Amino acid sequence: MSLKRFGTRTLAQLVPPITARALGHRGSAVAGLITKWPEIVGPAIGRASLPRKLVFPKGARSDGTLYVAVASHLATELQHLEPMVLERINGFLGYGGVKRLRLVQDMTLQAPKPLKKAAANEKPEPAAGAGPAGETLHAALDRLGKAVDAHAKDQEPLKK
């Protein structure tokens, strides 16, 4: 078999024929959902879930069920957000293609990593309400009030 007859092609030219066989006639919708999933549902949900398959009733192209693999920590939250997620999905598809979500817990999807603890030699961050130099909000407001009063005393009163 000679490679000359194929010529040079970009990846974008090669992928559609390959995926068309794998995904069937619904390939573009499912592929779009998979590739744009974080943009459709938002980054928080997108990191911990992934659409697996879209199943339509026999002979129909709407009112389908979207199977979504979801990490266990997000399953309950996603169940409550289902109406909003369905609205976003159908907005992306451009029609009422998905009627319901079917959540499947997937242990391979991981929970977000916990925040790292501060090292022993690092300075602790200032308390809430503290300014850049560790100044509290109360002290900053007091200083601002004194500056406003001083400025007002220097000004001439308004004449009517």
Image (tube, rainbow, N blue to C red):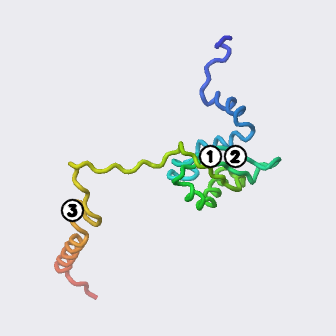
- The residue pinned by badge 2 equals 54
Of helix, strand and loop, which one carries label 2?
Answer: strand
Q: Amino acid at mark 3?
A: Gly
Q: Which of the numbered marks, if any, corresponds to residue 82?
A: none
| Residue 3 position (above or below residue 159) | above
Residue 133 located left or right of residue 115: left
Q: Are marks 3 and 1 in contact (CB under 8 Å)?
A: no
- C-alpha span from label 3 to label 1: 47 Å
Q: Quadrant of residue 139?
A: bottom left
Is 62 on the left or on the right of 128, as rendered? right
Q: Nearer the viewer, residue 112 or 32?
A: 112
Give the answer, above or below, for where 125 lies relative to 31: below
Could you say where residue 158 lies in the image, as x and y percent from the top left? 25, 84
In the rendered image, the residue lying farthest to the right is 59
Circle 1/circle 2 CB separation < 8 Å: yes
Neighbor class of circle 3 (other Cα within 10 Å; few <14, some 14-19, many 20+) is few
Query: Going 26% across and 57% down the picture, which residue do you hit?
Result: 125
**Amino acid type of disc 2?**
Leu
Residue highlighted by disc 1: 51
